[in-house]
Amino acid sequence: MPRQFFVGGNFKMNPATQEQKRALVKTLNDADIDPAVEVVIAPPSIYLLALKDTLRKDIQVAAQNCYCKPTGAFTGEISPAQLVDAGVPYVILGHSERRTLFHESSELVAQKTKAALDAGLAVILCVGETLEEREQGRTAQVVEAQLQPVVQVVGEKDWSKIVVAYEPVWAIGTGKVATSAQAQEAHDNIRRFLAKAVSPAVAESTRIIYGGSVTAANCKELATQPDVDGFLVGGASLKPEFIQIINAKRA
């Protein structure tokens, strides 16, 4: 079975105002979007329910993070159970900003991933290397080390609810972008790792998407690569060009 193209929009800590939020919703609701693409946007948690209720039904929402416990004294956190109860289908976990700014280890990301899957969420699982790690030729090693703790706690059947987002840290928000060949090589390495660590069937069916300064100008070439199954878009998801990125596979 061909893998369905997937485009996610990570709004991060944007938009800043209700007016900007309404403008984003209008752009998405009015857009001509390729119906073959799965589209998921991740607004700040304060906007999750409002966007879920006002967006067109072929665009889903994702939380940008969640904790690994169902309830408890964890000020500022959202639980997987709360997201499921609210009708939110997806959560982003392991984003490089969570790993670096908030010091989340790969083991914690794995715990969160298992908790999210067990609660019934689908997960956009982010992995990627720094510029220093790439220059040292350690890209595959670093990414596999980020995936390994997840492999250890997630059963084979649950990989159907994981989308792996390869996001080289050096390309996020910098304007730099991995070449289509670099992206394809990294995605192929991830797929080979999954075949070895989980199963060939999981490797073949898991969607591996690219994130890191994706724009309307570079998305079409990236989308031609056989192991690039979509994008996780940051800054450009707040702009009208996000529609062109969603439609990158459209002739």
Image (cartoon, helix red, strand yellow):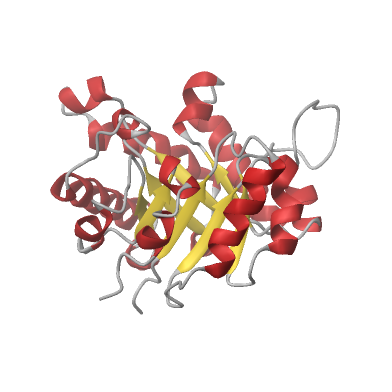
Instruction: Quadrant for residue 158, please give it.
Output: bottom right
At horizontal 27% and vertical 33% (from top left) the residue drawn is 141
In the image, 200 versus 81, the foreground residue is 81
In the rendered structure, the answer to whether residue 108 lies left or right of residue 141 reads right
- Residue at 17 percent across and 50 percent down: it is 180
Q: Is residue 152 left or right of residue 194?
A: right
Q: Position of residue 22 (x, y in %)?
A: 66, 52
Instruction: Give the mark count.
Output: 0
Q: Is residue 216 visible?
A: yes
| Front one among 84 and 237 | 237
Foreground residue among 226 and 242: 242
Q: Is residue 122 visible?
A: no
Please say if 157 is above or below 69: below
Looking at the image, which is closer to me, 147 or 87? 87
User: Is 172 drawn above or below residue 64 in the view shown?
Assistant: above
In this view, which residue lies farthest toward the right? 72
Q: Which residue: 16% across, 28% down?
A: 137
In percent of width and height, residue 101 lies at: 52, 20
Could you say which quadrant of the image residue 6 lies in? bottom left
Q: Position of residue 188 (x, y in %)?
A: 22, 53
In the rendered view of the protein, which quadrant contains the C terminus?
Answer: bottom left
**182 in relation to 250, above or below:** above
Residue depicted at 49% across the width and 59% down the height: 159
Q: Percent from the top left, x then y, of residue 225?
A: 20, 60
Say which quadrant the N terminus sits in.
bottom left
Query: In the rendered image, which quarter is residue 136 located in?
Result: top left
